[in-house]
Image (tube, rainbow, N blue to C red):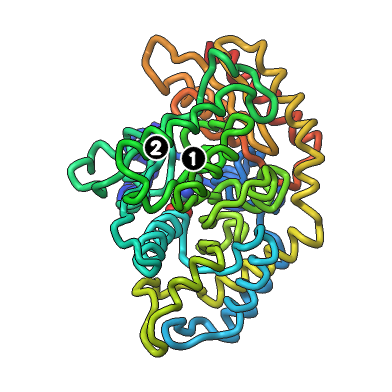
Amino acid sequence: MEKSGRDQHKGELEAFWMPFTANRQYKSAPRLMTHAEGMYYQDDKGNSVLDGTAGLWCCNAGHSRKKITEAVSEQIAKMDFAPTFQMGHPLPFQLAERLSALTPDPLNRVFFTNSGSESVDTALKIALAYHRANGEPQRTRFIGREMGYHGVGFGGISVGGIGNNRKTFSGQLLSGVDHLQHTLDLDRNAFSRGLPQHGAERAEQLEQLINLHGAENIAAVIVEPLSGSAGVILPPEGYLERLRSITAKYGILLIFDEVITGFGRVGDAFAANRWKVTPDMMTTAKGLTNGSIPMGAVMVSDFIYEACMSGPEGVIELFHGYTYSGHPVAAAAALATLDIYEEEKLFSAADRMASVFEEAVHSLADCPNVVDVRNVGLVAGIQLAPSSEGIGKRGFAVFNRCFHAGTLVRATGDIIALSPPLILEADHIDQMVTTLAEAIRQSA
Ligand SMILES: Cc1ncc(COP(=O)(O)O)c(C=O)c1O
């Protein structure tokens, strides 16, 4: 008798407690990737799977890029590790310089981390350190946003606004955090192309929170320029500008969490560049190394860094850092990644492809149960009405059908997110959208 998927893999799969996964469901019918190149994965059965999600919003230059592989191999053979606490090695200095050239001024200082979650917690801590150094130590409150995703550290889930990520831990979240309303508004903005027209006024709620808590007590506001993990929630036109002007008026730091919007996703180096709104700090990760080696970075404005440098010389200015902050192998991967982005002009390539992508994803509007299609750059969200079986069931069915038909998409509840590598071509878009349309029909 043929063994079921679960029996076959029992033992092999049991020990790994998988992140953000329905473990028992997955282990009963696993989806295992074994190889990847360019726009495609290959699964353990040899099937080719088109990558509609750049891995997890990170492999922006496509998979298994030779330049990165070689840079990593060379560096690991030359020097596997050197500390960056009271020591240094050349690569993170070079990388910081390259990154500061990509970000708007005055975001010229870089603190390295290993992930988006660490970048977020680092930025929140730097905000507190800055206000203390600047003579306003009572500025300790943070403002996040409903539906925001800022990773899984205690800081990140506190300023984040996704209920499921917070509920289990609710007794121990950071105190002194409040949230703005999210910007999803299907009544006014359904089937938007590019930034939605309506909703900039939701930024004005910040004034209400300032009235409630006192500007003098608020350290920072943190938002994703566009929320990816909650299911592609876009900033209405003018919204980010308003947040910027209100935070500037009250001396509150503005942090953009650019973990998924960084490195070309919206057709420019960062959303800040694209939409010409400059925050005081920016968190990044993912596309920084093309997903190849874990690494994150916080881009910090000069004035924040300089304020923190005001104590006596010879004393550590910020009691914060990770053993692997600026890891040489990760830095080598990041430098090679930036070379690829630059040599292949991938950010403008993404911008050029965005209109073809937009046309294609909006063709899904006619499929059954589609209640919204929204897109910007190389990101799209296709929102489906939940099935009678419950929230998320239809989204998962579509994801699973797409996978078995050879295309990887991502489902958040009943929202399907697409965020393909920036190297994609028109025939990849065709394949992605045709597979998705069929899967949506079959899941009606
Ligand atoms: C906006 C944002 N911030 C932070 C994170 C967390 O990054 P990581 O999973 O690398 O910790 C993510 C991950 O998807 C993200 O989308």
Q: Position of residue 99 (x, y in %)?
A: 64, 66
Above or below for 17 versus 372: below
Q: For residue 26, which numbered disc appears in the image?
A: 2
- Could you tell me if residue 394 is visible in this image? yes
Side of 311 where 263 appears, left or right: right
Task: State yes or no: discs 1 and 2 in contact (Cβ < 8 Å).
Answer: yes
Residue at label 1?
31
Tell me the quarter of the image containing the N terminus: top left
Side of 175 where 232 appears, left or right: right
10 Å crowding of disc 2: few (<14), some (14-19), many (20+): some
Side of 228 where 144 appears, left or right: left
Residue depicted at x 64% and y 41%: 51
Looking at the rendered structure, the secondary structure element under dot 1 is: loop
Snapshot quadrant of residue 28: top left
Q: Nearer the viewer, residue 122 or 264?
A: 122
Q: Position of residue 40 (x, y in %)?
A: 67, 45
Residue depicted at x 36% and y 86%: 315
**Mark toward the start of the polypeptide (1 vs 2):** 2
